[in-house]
Image: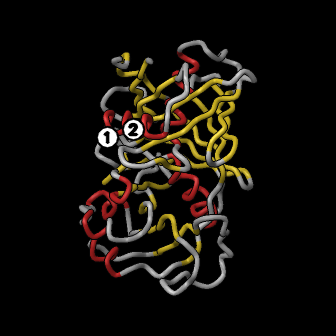
């Protein structure tokens, strides 16, 4: 089995978000996939199996668990499928995932465009542990309801509300504050959620908003570039800025640039990727 390491949302090495991609010739058990992801020790490892009908079964694993939606590893997967010429440049790739069907197509400028679900958030009380862990004042706190719950955008989610929360969306004062955050990951990991999307308006004219993503409870203290987070950020900033097309920057140590556009209940994410390593799994 070949394993590829791809930097997503970047055209250069040492930038964007690295993902491992495995194109499977045979089935692997869940334990096998989790062990490989732990061995690769990247934010996500993607496993693809191309079916006879040309759809691709796609799953994503962090070093410690499977996740329901991952943007950068989807971009990396599509990049490898096009690069290996398993799909023609003008062919749309259809991925069957835990988040339903996701499609990726190649644009004329070489960028890849992913079609993902838009994810709403609901006003929420921010836990005191999170404020302490971030070490800054919070402008807004929203929560992404879990399961099959949908945010009603009415009222406030609290610890007493019987709705599971998967992630918190937190806006801080400005880009400088966002970049200077040095979270206490031990405190963040005490919250029973997947992660924390922290965002701010961009201070530079090139970008509309900036963000960072912390997910210590699933083995990722800080994710370099997070497609999933922008499925939440797109409808949030659309309401605040009164527009539906954005250029976004995720301000991690490596950093990455994304094109983001909101189309009703869907979000289109665009970016490039580069293959860094190719390896063959040992027997």
Which residue lies at the image location 54% right of the left edge and 36% below the top edge? 74
The picture quadrant where one finds residue 198 is bottom left
The quadrant of the picture occupied by the N terminus is top left
Q: Is residue 197 visible?
A: no
The residue wearing badge 1 is 254
User: Horizontally, is 158 left or right of 256 in the view?
Assistant: right
Which residue lies at the image location 31% right of the left edge and 40% below the top edge? 254
Query: Of residues 180 and 61, which is closer to you in this image?
Result: 61
Which residue lies at the image location 33% right of the left edge and 58% below the top edge? 216
Query: Of residues 211 and 213, which is closer to you in this image?
Result: 213
The residue wearing badge 2 is 17
Which residue lies at the image location 56% right of the left edge and 29% below the top edge? 48
Where 151 falls versus 219 (above or below)? below
At which x and y percent is residue 11?
Answer: 42, 26
Q: Tell me the SS state at disc 1.
A: loop
At which x and y percent is residue 29?
Answer: 49, 35
| Mark 2 residue crowding within 10 angstroms, few (<14) / some (14–19) / many (20+) | many
Look at the numbered discs 2 and 1 and tell me whether their residues touch, using CB distance below 8 Å.
yes
């Amino acid at each position: 089995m070949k394993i590829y390491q791809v930097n997503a949302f970047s055209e250069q090495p040492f930038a964007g978000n690295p993902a491992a991609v495995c194109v499977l010739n045979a089935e692997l058990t869940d334990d096998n996939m989790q062990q490989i992801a732990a061995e690769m020790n990247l934010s996500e490892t993607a496993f693809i199996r191309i079916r006879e009908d040309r759809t691709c079964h796609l799953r994503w694993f962090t070093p410690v668990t499977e996740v329901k939606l991952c943007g950068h590893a989807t971009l990396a997967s599509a990049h490898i499928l096009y690069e290996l010429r398993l799909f023609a440049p003008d062919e749309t790739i259809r991925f069957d995932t835990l988040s339903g069907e996701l499609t990726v197509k190649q644009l004329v400028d070489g960028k890849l465009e992913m079609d993902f679900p838009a994810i709403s958030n609901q006003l929420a009380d921010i836990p005191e542990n999170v404020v302490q862990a971030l070490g800054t004042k919070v402008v807004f706190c929203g929560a992404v309801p879990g399961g099959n719950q949908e945010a009603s955008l009415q009222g406030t989610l609290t610890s007493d509300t019987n709705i599971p929360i998967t992630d918190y969306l937190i806006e801080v004062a400005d880009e400088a504050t966002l970049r200077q955050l040095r979270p206490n990951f031990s405190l963040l990991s005490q919250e029973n959620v997947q992660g924390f999307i922290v965002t701010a308006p961009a201070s530079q004219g090139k970008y509309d908003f900036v963000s960072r993503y912390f997910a210590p409870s699933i083995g990722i203290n800080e994710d370099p570039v997070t497609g999933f987070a922008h499925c939440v950020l797109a409808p949030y900033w659309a309401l605040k800025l009164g527009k539906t097309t954005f250029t976004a920057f995720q301000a991690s140590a490596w950093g990455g640039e994304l094109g983001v556009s909101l189309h009703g209940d869907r979000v289109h994410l665009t970016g490039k990727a580069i293959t860094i390593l190719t390896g063959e799994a040992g027997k």
